[in-house]
C-alpha cells in the first residue's frame, strides 16, 4: 500500500502519538467498501436478525486461511441454505446436514466437520431459538465474555451429544488451549458493536467488555506500533487481552472499534515484518512504526 497526498494516514505522527493515527486508519477502513471482501459481508446480506446471527457464526467459523478460499465455501453454503438459513438449519437432521455440507472442504476441515457444525447449530436453535441464550448463560457466571463464548461452544457441541457425526473440529475453537479466540471474538464484535458496519444484535453486552480478534496480521501491526512488546511469540489470548487494554488509552468504552481498521491495514500487503529500505518509506505505518524507525 502506498501513501498518496490524500491518504488520511499520511501524517507527521511520532511513535508516541498513536491516537490521531489510529483515528485516521479507523476512518479510512471502517466503511462499507471494506466489508465487501470481508466475512462480515455474509451475515449483512440478510435482513432477519436470527439469520444474521447464525450466518455470522458460520462465517466466523470458516474465516481462516486465504480469504478467497473460505469466502468461496461460504458462498456455496449460502446458496444451499437459501433465503432463510436459520429456519432451514433448524429443520435439518443429521442426513440433511450431511447433504448441505457435502463437498464443503476448507484446508483441514472436511464435509463431516461442516455437517457437524450445522448439526450443532440446528440442535441449539431447536432448543433455545438462537445462539444468544447459550452465550448469556456463561456470561452470567461472572460477566466474563470468555465464559460466555465457552458456554456457546458447549451449547453447539456438548460433550454428551448423541450423533454419528465426527464433530466440528477446528471450526469450533478451544477456549482452554491458549488460543486468542480470533474467530469467536470477531463474531462477538459483529454481534455487539452497532455502528453501521457491525451488526449490533446483542445489546446487553457492553462494547468495553469485548476482546480484540487477534490474528497474525493484527499481532504484527500491534507490535510495530508499540501496543505489544516487540519480542513476543504469539498470538495468544493474553496478547489479545493486553492489546485490548492498550487500545483503551484511545477509546475506553469501545477499544475494539480499531480492530477492523488494523486488520485491513495488516492484510493489505507490502509489509515484510522487518525494515526494508524500498517498501518501508512508502508504508502508511512508517511515521509510527517502531521497526521502520529502528531501520532508519
Image (spheres, rainbow, N blue to C red):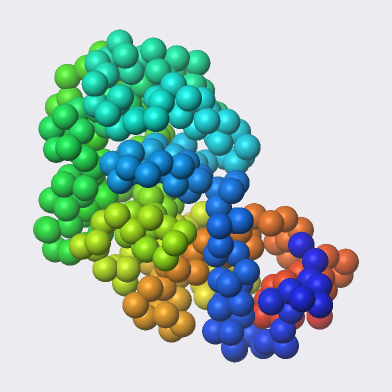
Q: Left or right of 222: which side holds 153?
A: left
Locate residue 218: give its quadrant: bottom right
Please give the name of the residue rendered at 55% of the width and 52% of the height, measured from the top-left corner.
Answer: 35
Q: Left or right of 125: which side holds 97?
A: right
Can residue 286 be seen?
no
Please give the name of the residue rendered at 46% of the width and 59% of the height, measured from the top-left corner.
Answer: 197
Asked if 119 appears above or below 256 in the picture, the reply is above
Between 202 and 168, the one nearer to me in the picture: 202
Can residue 51 be seen?
yes
Q: Give coordinates of residue 133: x percent, y percent.
A: 16, 47
Asked if 56 appears above or below 91 in the picture, the reply is below
Total marks in image: 0
Please give the name of the residue rendered at 46% of the width and 82% of the height, measured from the top-left corner.
Answer: 250
Q: Give coordinates of residue 265: x percent, y percent.
A: 64, 63
Q: Give coordinates of residue 112: x percent, y percent.
A: 39, 18
Q: Left or right of 130: which side holds 68?
A: right
**Which quarter shows the N terminus?**
bottom right
Asked if 254 appears above or below 169 in the picture, the reply is below
Q: Left or right of 224: which side holds 1?
A: right
Between 24 and 238, the one nearer to me in the picture: 24
Locate residue 97: give its quadrant: top left
Q: Give coordinates of residue 104: x percent, y percent.
A: 49, 21
Please give the name of the residue rendered at 30% of the width and 24% of the height, measured from the top-left corner.
Answer: 88
**Which quarter shows the C terminus?**
bottom right
Amino acid at each position: 500500500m502506498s501513501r498518496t497526498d490524500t491518504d488520511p494516514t499520511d501524517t507527521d505522527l511520532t511513535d508516541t502519538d498513536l491516537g490521531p493515527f489510529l483515528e485516521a486508519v479507523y476512518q479510512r477502513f471502517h466503511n462499507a467498501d471494506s466489508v465487501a471482501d470481508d466475512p462480515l459481508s455474509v451475515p449483512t446480506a440478510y435482513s432477519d436478525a436470527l439469520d444474521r446471527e447464525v450466518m455470522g457464526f458460520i462465517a466466523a467459523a470458516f474465516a481462516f486461511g486465504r480469504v478467497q478460499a473460505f469466502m468461496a465455501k461460504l458462498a456455496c453454503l449460502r446458496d444451499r441454505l437459501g433465503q432463510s438459513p436459520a429456519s432451514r438449519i433448524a429443520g435439518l437432521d443429521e442426513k440433511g446436514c450431511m447433504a448441505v455440507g457435502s463437498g464443503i472442504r476448507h484446508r483441514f476441515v472436511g464435509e463431516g466437520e461442516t455437517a457437524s457444525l450445522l448439526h450443532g447449530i440446528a440442535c441449539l436453535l431447536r432448543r433455545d431459538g438462537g445462539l444468544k441464550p447459550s452465550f448469556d448463560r456463561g456470561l452470567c457466571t461472572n460477566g466474563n465474555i470468555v465464559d460466555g463464548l465457552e458456554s456457546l461452544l458447549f451449547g453447539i457441541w456438548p460433550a454428551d451429544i448423541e450423533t454419528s457425526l465426527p464433530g466440528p473440529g477446528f471450526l469450533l475453537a478451544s477456549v482452554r488451549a491458549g488460543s486468542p479466540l480470533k474467530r469467536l471474538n470477531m463474531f462477538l464484535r459483529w454481534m455487539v458493536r452497532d455502528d453501521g458496519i457491525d451488526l449490533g444484535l446483542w445489546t446487553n453486552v457492553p462494547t468495553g467488555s469485548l476482546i480484540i480478534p487477534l490474528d497474525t496480521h493484527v499481532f504484527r501491526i500491534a507490535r510495530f506500533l508499540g501496543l505489544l512488546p516487540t519480542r513476543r511469540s504469539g498470538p495468544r489470548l493474553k496478547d489479545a487481552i493486553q492489546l485490548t487494554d492498550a487500545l483503551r488509552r484511545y477509546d475506553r468504552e469501545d477499544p475494539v472499534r480499531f480492530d477492523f481498521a488494523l486488520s485491513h491495514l495488516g492484510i493489505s500487503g507490502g509489509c515484510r515484518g522487518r525494515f526494508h529500505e524500498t517498501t518501508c518509506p512508502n508504508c502508511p505505518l512508517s511515521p509510527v512504526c517502531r521497526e521502520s524507525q529502528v531501520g532508519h
